[in-house]
Amino acid sequence: MENYDYDLQSIQEARVLARAGKAAADILAGYDAEQIDRIVQNMVRAAEVNAAELAALAVEETGFGKIEDKIFKNRLASTELYESIRETKTIGVIREDKTNQMMEIAEPVGLLMGIIPSTNPTSTTIFKSIIAIKARNGIVFSPHPSALKSIRRAAELMHAAAVEAGAPEGIIGCVTKPSMPATQELMKCDEIAMIIATGGSAMVKSAYSAGKPALGVGPGNVPAFIERTADIPKAVANIIASKTFDNGTICASEQSVIVEECIRSQVIAEFEHQGGYFMNEEETAKVGAKLFVKGHAMNSRLVGRSPQVIAEAAGIRIPAGVKVLLGEQQGVGAGFPLSYEKLTTVLAFYTVEDWREACDLSIRLLRNGGVGHSFSIHTQNDEMVMEFAQKPVFRILVNTGSTQGGVGASTGLSPSFTLGCGTWGGSATSDNVGPQHLINIKRVAYGIKDCTAPSPYSVPSPQQPKQQEDALLLNLVDELVSILQKSGDC
């Protein structure tokens, strides 16, 4: 197709991949649980063996994050994920209610479209490939152009491993000539049954407007509240470990730290002791100006970067060994750039009088681009946890880093790289997305109540009262005639 323009080539490629994927998905729909598990296990092995190669490729291509953390993410998206979903029923009878004589039977959705971001390119590709196959679906990926090589490589490895274990050719595809027309073609083509969108808000909204089922996720902008009863050294350690993990590229990472006035000095001292650098007002303004373009859109050149890279870009000097930059903010929204989501190693810092003020501030921050996602609290007071459990989010993470907690690495949440934000955040689900979201469910229900007898709740028809009145009058006439006859008057 070298004589065709790039956009036409990309559209045609999308159509070819969709047709091949649909044909393969139709075949996979007939596989049994043993066949599917064998395929998934082989995909997990391939992801494990190639985790380091894929991590290095992603960092080299995008410049985002750290190789060691991307290796961890690749393994979380495969080995840890498999341990979590191994017993999940996605084929045949998945539930049976003998009391009510009803059963539920799983059916695959069909061919999925997976939209992959540049921040977590290989781990998200691995994750979506495995959950798609676990639910007997095919998938075609639309990669972010700036992470094309790493996403394509991950998709190729997943496809090869699946086919080697018995899956049909074409079951996992990836666009190699990414373009907006190709993405839109995939979203709207008849072969695609459902879209799983991970990426920016505009892309997610586009997926939901495609006219077919979609699972999308929104931004995080996660507040982290250190309450007065918290184990301060542990809380700070968790926040730093979370925010520096892959240089803050996961949307569940903390974006703001909120502390009460009574422990402010202790928290600041602990952050400084553990590698945090508190910028002065001028430095904070310079960093804020560099982090964002066109309002509060994140500058892609500073996504997933170290404090040293950010400091150099902003023209400020920081001590050696700094792990995270903190800037005090006095408000939320326009004029306070650090109050927005920052997928990098920068945190906003707020001081409040008490937990009630922290509560109000948290809601304002969440409404500034994070409603429905996650909230983090560090406390030893269980009653305080329940107070903050009322926040407009679907993940309340307690005494853990929100990155590791949100994706299910340090909590009992399902391992996932697609974190739903519910209706509050414009998502179709509030869950950590897994294979259970990628099946249709049939219900077989036996009759358990006899509905042939007249209902005790039947309402008389409008004619019934008139008929009853006529019958009563006829009876009275008959009685009157009988009496007259007996008396001889008739």
Image (cartoon, grey):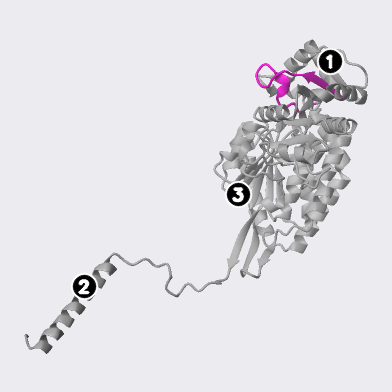
Above or below, 141 against 352 in this view is below
Residue 146 visible at all: no
Q: CA distance from mark 1 to mark 2?
A: 100 Å
Q: Secondary structure at mark 3?
A: strand
Measured from the top left, where is residue 430 in percent x and y?
A: 67, 44
Q: Secondary structure at mark 1?
A: helix
Measured from the top left, where is residue 299 in percent x and y?
A: 73, 22
Task: Look at label 3 and name its amino acid.
Answer: Ala
Residue 97 visible at all: yes
* Nearer to us in this view, 193 or 392: 392
- Residue occupied by mark 2: 470
- Magenta stretch: give its range: 324-344
Above or below, 97 against 261 in this view is below
The mark nearer the N terminus, 1 or 3, is 3
* Nearer to us in this view, 204 or 484: 484
Q: Quadrant of the C terminus?
A: bottom left
Residue at the extreme front of the image, as rendered: 487
Q: Which mark is residue 193?
A: 3
Q: Which mark is residue 312?
A: 1
- Magenta segment's dominant SS is loop
Mark 1: few/some/many CA within 10 Å (<14, 14-19, 20+): few
The residue positioned 73% from the left and 15% from the top of the image is: 289
Task: Look at label 2 and name its amino acid.
Answer: Asp
Mark 2: few/some/many CA within 10 Å (<14, 14-19, 20+): few
